[in-house]
Amino acid sequence: MILDHQTRKGTCVMAANYTIKDGAILCHACGLTSHNPNDVQNLFCGKCGKFHTKKKKYNHLFGLGFTVDSDNDGEAITADELLAAMERRVSYLRQHRGEILEACGFPEDTIENEE
Ligand SMILES: [Zn+2]
């Protein structure tokens, strides 16, 4: 198991490298399982003498443009036409994977989630 060490507040902490199960915390670095509620709550490994850190999770909002060919005007586009157009766009991108990043661009918004 590879540890991703970071230095925070002068303390060497480990990136998410633990498992909490059945009220105990298992340290993947040393293999110690602690049932001490304080260790579990603080993500602490007494053998390593270090605190684990929660890995950050993010939620990114992307927009994907696509066109719709229709006999209807823009205000009368149906859900089926939109879905078919989206599926064509995704199908095209599956075949042209090199265009996916450009098609999606950068996230329009990003929020940080709790793990
Ligand atoms: Zn440990």
Image (tube, helix red, strand yellow):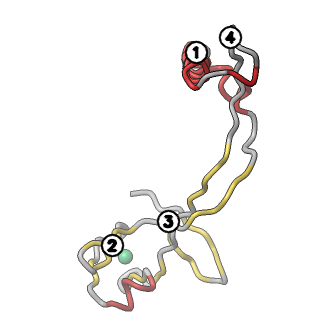
Of the residues under marks 3 and 2, which one precedes in the sequence? Answer: 2
- Mark 2 within 8 Å of ligand 1, using the beta carbon: no
Per the image, label 2 sits on a secondary structure element best described as: strand
Amino acid marked by disc 2 = Ile
Of the residues under marks 4 and 1, which one precedes in the sequence? Answer: 4
Question: In terms of image quarters, where does ligand 1 lie?
Answer: bottom left
Give the distance between the C-alpha atoms of the residues marked 2 and 1, in whole angstroms: 43 Å
Residue occupied by mark 4:
70
Q: Position of residue 60 (x, y in %)?
A: 65, 49
Give the distance between the C-alpha atoms of the residues marked 4 and 1, in whole angstroms: 14 Å
Give the distance between the C-alpha atoms of the residues marked 2 and 4, in whole angstroms: 53 Å
Foreground: disc 2 or disc 4: 4
Q: Position of residue 59 (x, y in %)?
A: 61, 53
Residue occupied by mark 2:
20
Q: Position of residue 56 (x, y in %)?
A: 57, 63
Per the image, label 3 sits on a secondary structure element best described as: loop
Would residue 46 be found to the left or right of residue 104 on screen? left
Give the distance between the C-alpha atoms of the residues marked 4 and 3, in whole angstroms: 43 Å
Amino acid marked by disc 1 = Arg
Amino acid marked by disc 3 = Glu
Q: Residue at x 74, y 27 (%)?
A: 102
Give the distance between the C-alpha atoms of the residues marked 3 and 2, in whole angstroms: 13 Å
Q: Quadrant of residue 10?
A: bottom right
Per the image, label 4 sits on a secondary structure element best described as: loop
Residue occupied by mark 3:
115
